[in-house]
Amino acid sequence: MISHAGNKDFRSQAFIGNSPEILNILNIVDKVADEDATILITGESGTGKELIAKEVHKKSSRRSEPLITVNCGAIPFELLESELFGHEKGAFTGAHRERIGRFELANNGTIFLDEIGDVSPEIQVKLLRVLQEHSFERIGSTQTISVNIRIIAATNKNLDHAIAEGKFREDLFYRLSVIPIKMPPLRDRKSDIPLLVNHFLEKFQAIRNTKEKKFSSEAMEVLIQYNWPGNIRELENLIERLSVLVDKSVFDVSDLPENFLHKKQEELKKSVSRLKKDIGFNDAVEQYQQHLILQALKNTDGVKSKAAELLKINRTTLVEKIKKMNIKQN
């Protein structure tokens, strides 16, 4: 199940979300997919950079040709040159046969260079030439090979800092970032968290063939307020863990890991401290109820019956509270 824009008219089969940040990125993807301009995707680990690269390729005229992915940070320096450009038999010790590099394999398609910020200066020089001339030589060969490819790169590093420190070529950076796409961290697109949670719940229910599960409204609120340093990857891992280890059909706050509860306890202490200084108990409870109601309405696109179901109260009760508290929806 993919959701994005709050209805069944999905433009993306790879990305889940209807936050302004994600909708803006998907609009950029639609505009540039059929162009050959080089794309540089930046953002923290786990934000979905590779998914965006796949989405660009899938929407392009190259979709029937290969998409070749190279994790530059996972391949040792001495092997990366051969991995990218290939080598001739006998080019170096251990080169017992000819090897075709990833750039050749990607001919007429797309090559995705992940973790480009980890590439050595020597490889950066060769990459610059490929970007400029779309040609290269295998290691140990003098024959120039020309390729017709779309290049997409990604990194979680700050390349501006790397350039200032002399670790990354400025000319290569400008060649790569013709179309820059910055992926937002999950903490900056909190409205997408319920959609992602439900998607991953359905995914792991289908894999394990288990009964339907969901989060209590309080547990969902904890997930929304959490900082998510590991982003979507961390969220997916959490949902998988709970799906395996917890047999209940409704996950509550006590089922969450200690680091989630620790943050909740810190927030509670701050609330109690504020309670002593600023407001009384009844006002604090009312403010918290207002916050929960507004969040539930936001997560259900303002549909009161669905918001009431999420809050586990009757619709009439919800309507009365909205009227009594003079809650206005954005």
Image (spheres, rainbow, N blue to C red):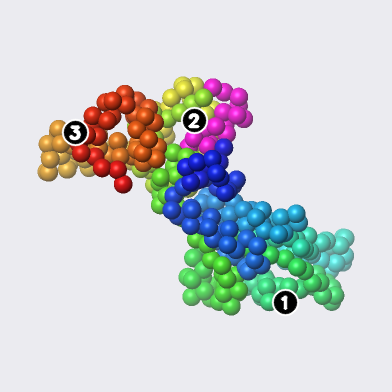
Residue under the image location 57 percent in, 28 percent down:
205
Could you say which is closer to the camera, residue 120 or residue 302?
302
Number of marks in the image?
3
On the image, the x and y values in percent for residue 135 come to 76, 73
Give the distance between the C-alpha atoms of the residues marked 3 and 1, in whole angstroms: 68 Å
Image coordinates for residue 19, horizontal then vertical, percent: 44, 49
Q: Determine which residue is flagged by label 2.
A: 242
Apparent side of residue 206 relative to residue 90 in the rendered image (left or right): left
- 175 to 281, vertically: above or below: below
Mark 3–mark 2 Cα distance, whole angstroms, equals 38 Å
Q: The disc labelled 3 sits on which kind of residue?
A: Lys
Question: Residue shown at 60%/74% (left/top)?
Answer: 175
- Residue 299 appearing in the image: no
Q: Are marks 3 and 2 in contact (CB under 8 Å)?
A: no
Q: Earlier in the sequence, mark 3 or mark 2?
A: 2
Q: Position of residue 227 (x, y in %)?
A: 39, 47
User: Which range of residues does the magenta coloring cover?
Assistant: 197-211
